[in-house]
Amino acid sequence: MKQIVGILLAAGSSRRFGADKRLHRLADGTPMALAAARRLAKACRRSIVVIRPGDDALAALFAAEGLETVVCDAAEQGMGHSLSRGIAASADADGWLLALADMPFIEAASYQAVVAALQNGAHLARPSYQGKSGHPVGFASNYLADLLALTGDQGGKAILEAHPADLQLCPVADPGVLKDIDQLSVRGSKYAGAHA
């Protein structure tokens, strides 16, 4: 069976949220980034959380869960650096499932659907809900060089756009694949929009 490694991008600076949203507690009291990491870890035997320098509180949370972390020294320069750092830490994998720490509402079945697509030979895969593409996104190992070359704010979107014929969509009944924490209402219980 192919080794699909989960990469959780948790090195953002949370500028739009106004506070460190990674530690924002969900309704059950779980810090958002930890909730996202737990769901990813259920789908991928090996999961890596990418954090930024000085993230001691987050690192301690993940360590207590037995989750692997890597520090991206260039995190402030954009998501591309964090993504490539996580890939570099697992360059021997057969593929990667890239997830975002601010999307803690994705159901386990949605992660598993993308992993299954990669296991069955897809080069690129992502879930779709009601016709809209969502997260997490899967990349097979033939995209290793492209992923390692990412810098700045350039994430995996450029790779997806350059290779549309390689993309397999995985329809799911899960609105969580489109929702991030910024779209919660002020009451903290409703979704307020779609995340492209």
Image (spheres, rainbow, N blue to C red):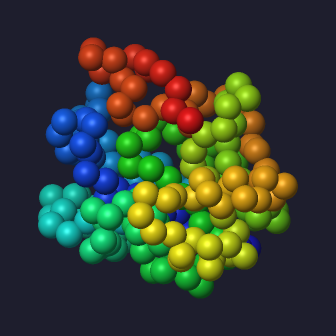
| Vertical order, 66 against 124 (above or below) | below
Relative placement, left or right, of 18 versus 134 is left
The residue at 57%/71% (across/down) is 147
Q: Residue at x 53, y 76 (%)?
A: 148
Q: Residue at coordinates 55% horizontally, 82% vertically from top-left?
A: 91
The residue nearer to you, when weighing 20 against 114, is 20
Give residue 29's quadrant in the image.
top left
x and y, in percent, of residue 90 in the image = 51, 79
The answer to whether residue 16 is left or right of residue 176 is left
What is the x, y in percent for residue 50? 36, 65
Q: Is residue 46 visible?
A: no
Q: Residue 10, how many percent across, how many down?
A: 34, 56
Foreground residue among 80 and 31: 80
For the point 57% across and 58% down, the residue is: 156
Does residue 181 sit above or below 46 in this rendering? above
* Residue 152, picture quadrant: bottom left
Q: In the rendered image, which quarter contains the N terminus?
A: bottom right
Q: Residue furthest bottom?
A: 92
Residue 21 located left or right of residue 132: left
